[in-house]
Amino acid sequence: MKRLIFLLTILIVIVACKSPEARKPISRKSGTFIKESAERNKVLYEKEKEQILALIQQDTLNKYIASENGFWYYYNIKIENDTITPKFGDIVTFNYNINDLNGNTIYSIDEIKTQQYAIDQEELFSGLREGLKIMKAGEQITFIFPSLKAFGYYGDEKRIGSNVPIISKVSLQSITKK
């Protein structure tokens, strides 16, 4: 009997001292969500691009420029003799409005009021952030931003819905160098 208890004790000690084994994951992530999301965004961008290009074709009064940053614009007021554009950290003072592609006002200049912005140091939607960098003091530019350069999937959670391309007329009043 003592021998049996001794063997059981040894057996329990050996089994209890066994190192733990790693558990296998219950589910594996394949990365398909991100791939599907990227595909949806490409399709959405192409659809918005078609709408924007159709709008541009209808507007024969203005000469649009395609930005390398993924938006389109034309000059309402262009300053030829000045070469200073804002750089990182410069403070700009500007006004802007926001319209939908049909020209309906979403936010007027009076509602938004005059803004001050430190270039690339504060929050601003990406299209406007990039657009301000190409402007000179005194210029006024009308931008057309696809939704990914505007307020994207979330909108502004007030008046701008999900995936809404916008038109914005921006007037850059001054640039204060850092």
Image (tube, grey):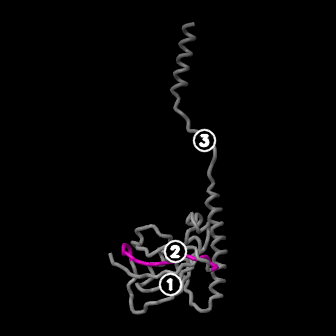
The vertical placement of 144 against 78, above or below, is above
User: Is 11 left or right of 82, judged from the image as shown?
Assistant: right
Q: Report the disc number at residue 141.
A: 1
| Residue 48 picture location, percent across and down | 64, 75
SS at mark 1 in the image: strand
Q: Quadrant of residue 121?
A: bottom left
Give the Cα distance between marks 2 and 1.
Answer: 13 Å
Q: Which of marks 2 and 1 is in front?
A: 1
Mark 3, residues whose alpha carbon is within 10 Å: few (<14), some, or many (≥20)? few
Q: What residue type is labelled 2?
A: Gly
Secondary structure under tag 2 reads: helix
Question: What residue does disc 3 label?
Answer: 24
2 vs 3, front mark? 2
Image spot of residue 33 (x, y percent): 63, 58
Between the residue at mark 1 and the residue at mark 3, the CA separation in whole angstroms equals 58 Å
Which residue is at 55% across, 25% downward?
A: 15
Q: What residue type is labelled 1?
A: Ile
The span picked out in magenta is 87-102
- Amino acid marked by disc 3: Lys
Disc 2 target residue: 127
Q: Position of residue 72 (x, y in %)?
A: 56, 81
